[in-house]
Amino acid sequence: NLGLPCSSSDTAYIMYTSGSTGRPKGVMTPHRAISRLVINSGYADIDANDCVAMAANPAFDAITFEVWAPLVNGGRLVVIDTDTFANPHLLANAITRHGINTMWLTMALFNQYVHTIGYALANLKHLLCGGEQGNLETFEALRQLGGPQHLINGYGPTETTTFAATYEAKSTDDKLERLPIGRPIGNTRLYVLDNYGQPVPVGVVGELYIGGDGVANGYLNLPELTAERFLPDPFSGAPNARMYRSGDLVKHLPDGNLVFLGRNDNQVKIRGFRIELDEIEARLVEHEIIREAVVVVIGSGEHRRLVA
């Protein structure tokens, strides 16, 4: 066994995400962030009896959970090819054939597949979904089919490594106005702050700041943007601790769960993809015949789309 000169704070990989300047930002994710995502995480206890589907694009940060959750916990990993994943009936067959019991879906695919292969999804042990605001009715529709054992809404930007908060659906969710994003996973801290960086009371809207081991090392070769989004964490006793300013507007429910309410900038999520409208506008005006451009989102739910 070779000795590797590596620490938990060293960058493990770089994953690119949408940037408002017209160029994607390289997020530098440390080793400790991956460990915190899949070991004693508090939301999905994967063990040697579990089989996880790997279906995400390797450039999408859900891949971090899909690969490492089974491999570091002694479970099995089954690679699902693109054609199979895009066809709900082929996917249902693959779930049965390989004994898959844990899967992650974008919210758009979840909404579609519940109504086509809900019978297969209901037999899973863990079904995690996220990427955009969830629909309470669709969650309840799957629960009415008898499962899965753990139906989890996951929230987290790439800068905090896949999941920062999770919420497990319950039978009492029909009393809620919207699906919560939940509570922090293990070794993660969530702060709801006002414009002065002070915590807001329960029920008051504030911006979500994320601290803990999942916070990235910043953006590759972008020191100014890193300093703007990755701030010193005044609530942590750890030396040099930082927190990520998410730009997401949230509020605490009386039971301690968080609810996502919107953004404080021009970032949107469509079918699980994080999109900076400013980035698209910047690209459009680079064309010689375009002087000005505005990009907006029209439609709702799985029918949302961009129009320039």
Image (spheres, rainbow, N blue to C red):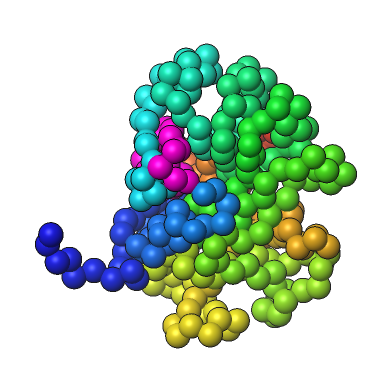
Q: Residue furthest left?
A: 2
Answer with left or right where residue 257 lies relative to residue 237: right
x and y percent of residue 132 in the render? 63, 43
x and y percent of residue 58 in the render? 36, 40
The quarter of the image holding the C terminus is top right
Location of residue 224 with respect to 68 vertically, above or below: below
Answer with left or right where residue 2 lies relative to residue 33: left
Write the residue at 43% across / 18% down. 97
Instruction: Specify the quadrant of the image occupied by residue 142.
Output: top right
Q: Is residue 53 magenta?
A: yes
Decide which of 216, 95 is in the foreground and name it.
Answer: 95
Q: Is residue 105 magenta?
A: no
Q: Magenta segment range?
A: 46-68
x and y percent of residue 141 in the render? 75, 27
Residue 14 seen in this snapshot:
yes
Location of residue 194 with respect to 277 vertically, above or below: below
Write the residue at 64% across / 45% down. 153
Write the residue at 63% across / 40% down. 150
Residue 141 seen in this snapshot:
no
